[in-house]
Every structure is written in structure tokens, then in C-alpha cells.
Image: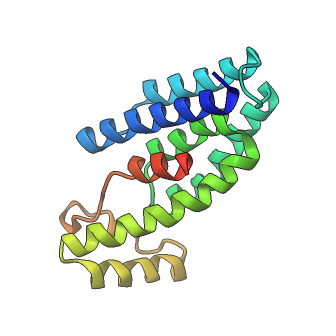
Amino acid sequence: MSSDALVLAAVAGSGGASAVVDLRTRRVPNWLTLTITSVGVSLAAAHLTTVSVAGALGGFAVGLLLMLPGHIVGATGAGDVKLFAAVGTLLGPTHIGVAFVYTAILGGALAVLVAMYRGRLQATLQETATLVVTGGANVARIERPTTDNRFAYAPAIAVGTIV
């Protein structure tokens, strides 16, 4: 198996498993992100991919730094941040940056579809605009359980990283 095929299989398997778990439980558990991180670093250490150990750790750091601001303002969960960082060990720092762009586009599209399905599109767009303009001042209002605006983000991460 070529290293590209191995990475694709690892990313697809990790993403698929994470998406299924997140859809069922609305959580991305630590054991899953730790396993993905271990696989990424192990593949790099064994020279089975084009990503070095330093590249795997760099991919983890870049993935973490890219997703962390979204968590700070309340747009993503901590499990999503850890999942994206873990996948960074498989892709390395450059490719995880590209994957972030695709993940953000797919996540935005998914958010719009979920809001439309729930009949909340206008309210979601207004709250999102306020979130961006105020730097997260309305997070408490957005995260109220009664607003019904949470959704599983791991599917967007899975597809974004595979693309």
C-alpha cells in the first residue's frame, strides 16, 4: 500500500468512526482522539507516510490552533478541536491547513442545512452575525439548551479532511 493510500485510509477510517460516534452521542471522546493521534505519530515514526514525526506533531499543533478560536467563541466543541488536531498528525501541518478550509466550508453548509431543517435559519444567521461582530458576547444565549442549535460537527471534519 502506498503512503498516500495509507494516509487516506487512516483519515477516512478516523473520520468515519468519529462521525458515527458524534452523530450517536453528540461527543467525540478522548479515547478516540488519543487513538487517532497515536496512529498518526506511529505511522510517522515507522516512516510509513511522507509525514515525519516532527510533521505529525506540527500537524497536531496547526490543527489545534486553527480550531481553538472557534471553541473559545463557542462555535465548536472541545472534542471537535481535539479531533481536528489528531487528524493533523496524519496530514501534517500544510495539509491540515488545507483541510481546515474544506472543513469550514462544509461545516458552514451543514449548519445552514440543519438550521433550515429545524426552521431556525433566520435566527441562526442573526446569532452568527452577532457572534462574529461581538467576538462571542452572545455565546451564553446561543448555547442555551432551548435554542436547539447544536449539531454533530465530526461529519464536516471527516469529509473536509478526506477532501
Is 148 placed left or right of 77 in the picture? left
Answer whether residue 162 is visible to the viewer in this image. Answer: yes
Q: Position of residue 135 (x, y in %)?
A: 55, 74
Is 139 placed left or right of 100 in the picture? left
Question: Measuring 30% from the left and 59% from the top, which residue is drawn there?
Answer: 150
Is 109 placed left or right of 11 in the picture? left
Answer whether residue 141 is visible to the viewer in this image. Answer: no
Question: Measuring 81% from the left and 30% from the top, which residue is drawn there?
Answer: 54
User: Residue 24, relative to residue 134: is it above or below?
Assistant: above
User: Residue 53, relative to residue 16: is it above or below?
Assistant: above
Q: Position of residue 146 (x, y in %)?
A: 18, 65
Question: Measuring 45% from the left and 41% from the top, which residue is drawn there?
Answer: 79
Q: Nearer the viewer, residue 13 or 22?
A: 13
Q: Nearer the viewer, residue 77 or 49?
A: 49
Question: Measuring 22% from the left and 68% from the top, which residue is drawn there?
Answer: 147
Q: Quadrant of the N terminus?
A: top right
* Coloring scheme used: rainbow
Is 18 placed left or right of 101 in the picture? left
Q: How many marks?
A: 0
Most extreme residue toward the top, as rendered? Answer: 46
Most extreme residue toward the front, as rendered? Answer: 1
Q: Quadrant of residue 125?
A: bottom left
Q: Position of residue 9 (x, y in %)?
A: 53, 30
Q: Nearer the viewer, residue 135 or 158?
A: 158
Q: Quadrant of residue 119?
A: bottom left
Q: Position of residue 126 (x, y in %)?
A: 37, 85
User: Residue 146, relative to residue 66: is it above or below?
Assistant: below
